[in-house]
Amino acid sequence: MTLQEMGLRAKEAARVLRTADAGLKNRALQAMADRLRTNTDPILAANAADLEAARQNGMRDALIDRLTLTTDRLVGMANGLLDVAALPDPIGEIIEGYVRPNGMRIQKTRVPLGVIGMIYEARPNVTSDAAGIALKAGNAVILRGGKEALHTNLAVATALRQGLSDVGLPEDAVQLIDKTDRETVREMMRLNEYIDVLIPRGGAGLIRTVVENATVPVIQTGVGNCHVYVDKDADIEMAASVVVNAKASRPSVCNAAETLLVHKAIAESALPVIAKALDKANVRLRCCERSLSLCRDYAACEVADNSDWETEYGDYIMAVKIVDSLDDAIDHIAQYSTHHSEAIITDSHSAAEAFTAAVDSAAVYVNASTRFTDGGEFGMGAEIGISTQKLHARGPMGLRELTSVKYIVFGNGQVR
Amino acid sequence: MTLQEMGLRAKEAARVLRTADAGLKNRALQAMADRLRTNTDPILAANAADLEAARQNGMRDALIDRLTLTTDRLVGMANGLLDVAALPDPIGEIIEGYVRPNGMRIQKTRVPLGVIGMIYEARPNVTSDAAGIALKAGNAVILRGGKEALHTNLAVATALRQGLSDVGLPEDAVQLIDKTDRETVREMMRLNEYIDVLIPRGGAGLIRTVVENATVPVIQTGVGNCHVYVDKDADIEMAASVVVNAKASRPSVCNAAETLLVHKAIAESALPVIAKALDKANVRLRCCERSLSLCRDYAACEVADNSDWETEYGDYIMAVKIVDSLDDAIDHIAQYSTHHSEAIITDSHSAAEAFTAAVDSAAVYVNASTRFTDGGEFGMGAEIGISTQKLHARGPMGLRELTSVKYIVFGNGQVR
């Protein structure tokens, strides 16, 4: 099938979903979960084929792990769909309603976006997660997963489509592109007539490619060069605890911190404590010249160069810099941050106010770990990614972030 | 100055504006209005030069009129800035605030977008309108107006920058690109490092060019192929009044209606009345075969071809089509609409419900004219354009649509 045909089918499916009520969408999610479970054998067989090819191509162990499905992981994917079914339906909410002086009643109403294009990499669970969240918000999806996971994704998509069909919804509400060449994905990025928004999920390279080539509106997700700033009025034990959590609780994810900034007035007392705690968590440090002498007795240290300030390590490595003032910390963040998540540790009210006002990131924390930037942790129930752009959605994206609005206006013959 | 330098300056100015309070921004708007008035002579002299060149290049009268500034129009521009000063500041609004089970307080707070790029055509008033609205919402602007208006725009921008400087705000919050070649505007569309959003205002060609070439996120504005559907249960007098208003009160604007759809059951009684009223307003008709015989005794009619259904005439011309049912009307709109504004005239509750649920446009009216899709008419106070896309903003864009959000999270040492 051509992409044009897929687009047309998605648009038709989106027309049906637009007026589908929550009950029907929830029954579809339950049927999709059932079909994932009853299709365990063909899905795991397809996954085995993908894994065999991946091993022959010398894929790294970490990526092999991401690609691997097991019965447990499939049950997890099915449960994810049931969790989404349990969330309130965002569609139809009247966000604002008011009467104009001429008597017209205006209702700003939440509606689906329409057709969502997802471009992602190796994890096959994204196929069902994205389809489920998009469906609950009334959207059709066109999915383009990594080529390493093609057979797995096709088997998962087949199960999801069966579920839609089981409850009488169009199975084209979930479509997976079965071509993995570059030309096809480039064509997808320019399918403005049919796709309302593209969401790339993956590494910085994938996201850059989509931003540079798409004419369809894009929501950028997930590149995080996050900072923790320890202010002169910080509680040092709290600082050590938050820094270790922000860096080392899961270094591979986008909300993990990469750079520690410390006010010069507290550096001498705080850095040895923090360095010791980071060392205990197996974190190696890349220190500015001033911080090096305060850290090197307590942790494995190297001298940082300028590239360290802009690196998202995704690993047990943290850059450390002493700053002369709160303003210097804010300036450093303005220069190097990817505007994902930043934290200040302080007991000073004015410092907290200044930091939260001046730092221009999706999430800004006072005395808490950057690791909380997450749809689940924010109470959204489900998440399709974390937006690092300012347009449409910023921060964790849940169901509401996959919606648009429509003004419905009731009159009795008003003219202008 | 290079675009890179302008971008850097805009970003620096945006950092200052981000924490500027409403009082300071309002004083800036007042000073900008003052400077427009005290710079009347140089602005009108620059405008005279642009007009002279335009006439020599054989510009059409309608465009000459758009380009022309007078003392009155300048006063109008200054008053527009004062109107924006009088509006409430959208920045700092806490849109949502809640406490998580671990005690973290999350505040979803309205913040400026940052740097807005405006690309527009001949009207020089857009220069001050856009700068004023952007500033009130805490944003810096980089403006690129039509080359026919370059001298006028430069003179206006100079006055606006003086006003910013008068109150101690960075004058680089308002910058106008003085190069009008295509290469520069293409570079502007790819200035992702410095520009947060591009808003093109102008004809369909301009908007297409921006959508196809920009890597900076774009908000599409203003292309309107709008429909009025007269249902079988319509009040015929109301239908005639709304249709005439929607078509003929200002045919050149995007919220004017282009196609009239009429249910077959009411066509025989309604079309003569509506055609007569349209004829009185100097509107010529392009009729489907069935409607032709019902209209041609009352108005100037031609036979429509398929291209008529997709034409935004911007003129005293209206396409007319008889449909067999409400569903056919909805299907026609789904096929041809640009998703701007559509209206149904009906006294049937179920028809109104079905139409407003199924029609996927920014504004959907029951018994009122499409001409109301406008920031002022919707009570927004000021407008920077009408978005016809679904991402970020849809429908009239006022101050709030030029903002983003930031999550500010207060903790006392929480880790994950």
Image (spheres, coloured by chain):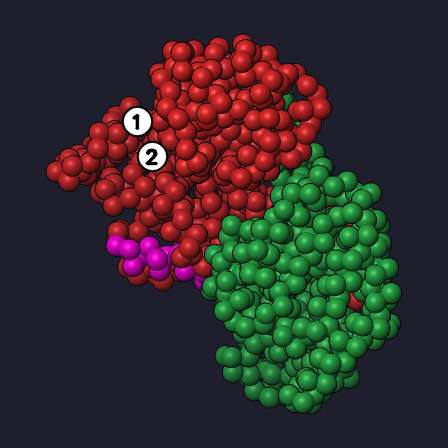
Chain colours: A red, B green
The amino acid beneath tag 1 is Arg
Mark 2 belongs to chain: A
| A236 inside magenta stretch | no
Magenta segment range? A181-194
Q: Position of residue B266 (x, y in %)?
A: 66, 72
Q: Which mark, residue A73?
A: 1
Sequence-wise, the earlier of marks 2 and 1 is 1
* Circles 2 and 1 in contact, beta carbons < 8 Å: yes
A19, above or below A89, in the image: below
Q: Which mark, residue A125?
A: 2
A227, above or below B258, in the image: above
Numbered marks: total: 2
Q: Is residue A129 left or right of residue B14?
A: left
In three-dimensional space, the C-alpha distance between marks 2 and 1, rounded to whole angstroms, equals: 8 Å
Q: Position of residue B324 (x, y in %)?
A: 55, 70
**Residue at disc 2, secondary structure:** helix
Q: Is residue A100 left or right of residue A385?
A: right
Are discs 2 and 1 located on one and the same chain?
A: yes
Q: Position of residue B229 (x, y in %)?
A: 64, 67
Is residue A350 in sight in this rendering?
A: yes
B207, above or below A170, in the image: below
